[in-house]
Amino acid sequence: MDGSAQPKRLLWQEAVIEAIHAETPTVKSFRLRPDSWTGFTAGQHVDIRLTAPDGYQAQRSYSIGSAPDASGTIELAIEALPDGEVSPFFHDVVEVGDRIELRGPIGGHFIWDRPLGGPILLIAGGSGLVPLMSILRHRAVVAPEVPAVLVVSARRYDDLIWRTELLRRAAEDPNLKVIVTLTREQARPGLRFGRIDMGLMADALAGGLPALTYVCGSTPFVEAAANLVLAAGVPFESVRTERYGGSKV
């Protein structure tokens, strides 16, 4: 098929890396400026493609963590996996000023914008926080009056992506409730210890049932969290899930 027949927004293009920041010991954020960018909706993702000198290509999908704005840039948060094909390149090789290939934005189900309203419940496991952070950041700009609850599970305190920003938003936003639980480190003040369970879900739903629920993380996490949400009485049709795993990144 002639590539020109594809929708324009799905064509591969180059993007320059404008900034790199270490968010956790294993996650770095990358600020990219695509050559041609017309915007995106919170919750969408892009495909990244790497091409080796011998022509071998590796392609992976990464959620956008930044909020939609007029800057012409997007932020990705990429976790380093030792046996991955793409993530080690980003962590060990890429530098500011380098150019990479991407296409997008992609996704029409796991998205949120002001017309969808709320309240919203966001549940993240590990790097599943990335698209939910895009939603939270966007909500803070366009609809801060919409009630939101974020439940985020991380292995350890230092593994919590955008930790300072999350805790600041929780302290400053009266319509945002953030519940953090750590699964491999004893809880710190204000945080929980252990996996998500019905007790934690009851806390998240103390203000009432959400109009929309978004769950993102590894396949086992998403299945467990979604089952807890449904068991707590949240309507099935209001739950949106996005999972990763299976493919090495």
Image (spheres, rainbow, N blue to C red):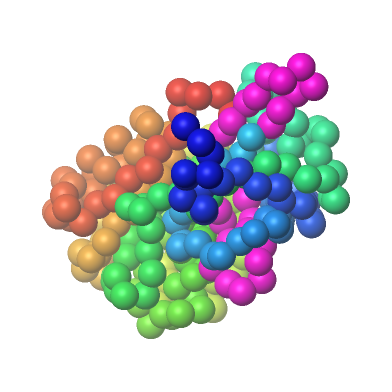
The image shows residue 219 at horizontal and vertical percentages of 38, 31
Please state which of residues 61 and 13 is positioned toward the viewer in this rendering.
Answer: 13
Range drawn in magenta: 50-77
Residue 242 can be seen, yes or no: yes
Location of the C terminus by quadrant is top right
Does 74 appear above or below 195? below
Q: Is residue 45 left or right of residue 58?
A: left
Does 224 appear above or below 73? above
Residue 130 can be seen, yes or no: no
The image shows residue 157 at horizontal and vertical percentages of 61, 47
Instruction: Tell whether position 70 is magenta.
Output: yes
Instruction: Tell whether position 52 is magenta.
Output: yes
Please state which of residues 236 and 103 is positioned toward the viewer in this rendering.
Answer: 103
**Residue drawn at 21 percent across, 56 percent down:** 238
**Residue drawn at 63 percent across, 26 percent down:** 58
**Residue drawn at 61 percent across, 61 percent down:** 37
Q: Is residue 205 left or right of residue 8?
A: left
Give the number of callouts: 0
Q: Residue furthest bottom?
A: 145
Q: Is residue 244 left or right of residue 51?
A: left
The image shows residue 99 at horizontal and vertical percentages of 78, 45
**Residue drawn at 50 percent across, 62 percent down:** 40
Does 117 appear above or below 8? below
Does 62 appear above or below 179? above
Please state which of residues 155 and 31 is positioned toward the viewer in this rendering.
Answer: 31
The image shows residue 234 at horizontal and vertical percentages of 18, 55
